[in-house]
Image: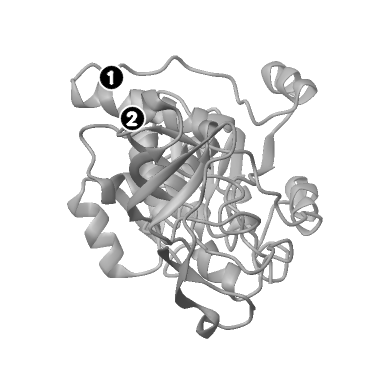
Amino acid sequence: MMKALRFDRTGSLDALSLQQVPPPRPQPGEVVVEICAAGVNPSDAKNVLGRFPYTTLPRTPGRDFAGVVVDGPAEMIGEEVWGTGKEFGFVRDGSHAERIAVPLDGIAPKPGLLTFAQAAGCGVPYTTAWDALERSGVGPGDGLLVIGAAGAVGRAALDLGRWRGAQVIGAVRRPQQVEQLAAEGFETILLGEGDDLSAAVRRYYPAGADVVFDTSGAWLGPSVAALADFGRIATIAAPPSGAAAAGPVPPRRQRRRRQLAALRQPRLRGDAGPLQRRLRHRLTAAAAGAAGTPARQRPRGLPRDRRRQHAEGGVHSWLMAHPSFPRQWG
């Protein structure tokens, strides 16, 4: 038997209890990992609160983990790994237990420069931030604004944006968060005070931001006004109302604002093994001092016909709803 955090009903965190359960056995194409550290994300708590109707019960929560393979293919026994995935904690038991059964494509070797706790904290935040920046085509010289920069995904986006060669600024709500990020070398805007978002952004990027990554969903409307021509917005959340925050938006961008109200709840994306492996290579190269700057990419978030118009100057900006980090609306 092993210890696991379990819930058999939703609606309150009081539903969680520590229980003794049988340890998992690997199915074909799986391994069993002994958990050395597990991450806790907002979606884990929201899951227990009943915000995800597709969750099946009873269930062990938790999406992110790092540990050692203890069962599965002989050549993998003893390997230190980290992982995350779309199903953990929702329709299959998650990482808040002593052991977890994991598909082979849901894990990657743990970088040697990271502790187990650090690797477990990278799953949802870093794979989400990486995918958002990749899809929005962030490259060398781009002006990147990260809203919600003090959160886990936002902090990851600052690091990854800087690594990709972008000019990075954050936006946060509290003065102490501005001080914390400044101590780490990041320029930061204080939201909700003084000038509107567009004016604050243009002090750093006179033509506007090339990419705005809004991790909160609460600043999507003002973000449109802060964009440069051909700018892109990536978002992983929406406000409780499902509509953009109030604020003046130029008439030619009203259509983008109407698109916000039509967004639906994001679907969970696939397992993050490929992203984990790419991040591992970046971390290893960075540790060895060999990390180069990626080549400039076209905006991958644009549909094919929009990419063509983008290149020809026919589209002013484009809005993407990025679904890799599930957040319940309302």
The disc label shown at residue 278, or none: none
Q: In the picture, which quadrant includes the N terminus?
A: bottom left
Q: Is residue 230 left or right of residue 60?
A: right
Q: Residue at x 33, y 30 (%)?
A: 163
Q: Are marks 1 and 2 in contact (CB under 8 Å)?
A: yes
Q: Quadrant of residue 143?
A: top left
Q: Position of 269 compared to 208: left or right?
A: right
* Element marked by disc 2: helix
Viewer-side residue, 303 vs 309: 303
Which amino acid type is marked by label 1?
Ala
Q: Residues within 10 Å of mark 1 (few under 14, many from 20)?
A: some
Q: Is residue 324 left or right of residue 71?
A: right
Q: Position of residue 236 (x, y in %)?
A: 59, 51
* Closest to the observer, 264 or 274: 274
- Real-space Cα distance between discs 1 and 2? 9 Å
* Residue 163 circle label: 2
Mark 1 secondary-structure assignment: loop
- The residue drawn where x is 64% and y is 78% is 9
| Disc nearest the viewer among 1 and 2 | 1
**Type of colouring:** one colour
**What residue is pinned by disc 1?**
291
Residue 75: quadrant of the picture: top left
Image: 297 above or below 106 = above
Picture coordinates of residue 92, whole percent (x, y): 61, 54
- Camera-side residue of 29 and 224: 29
The image shows residue 43 at horizontal and vertical percentages of 54, 62
Answer left or right for 288 relative to 254.
left
Position of the C terminus by quadrant: bottom right
Q: Position of residue 60 (x, y in %)?
A: 53, 64
Q: Amino acid at mark 2?
A: Trp
Q: Is residue 293 above or below residue 105?
A: above
59 vs 311, nearest the viewer: 59
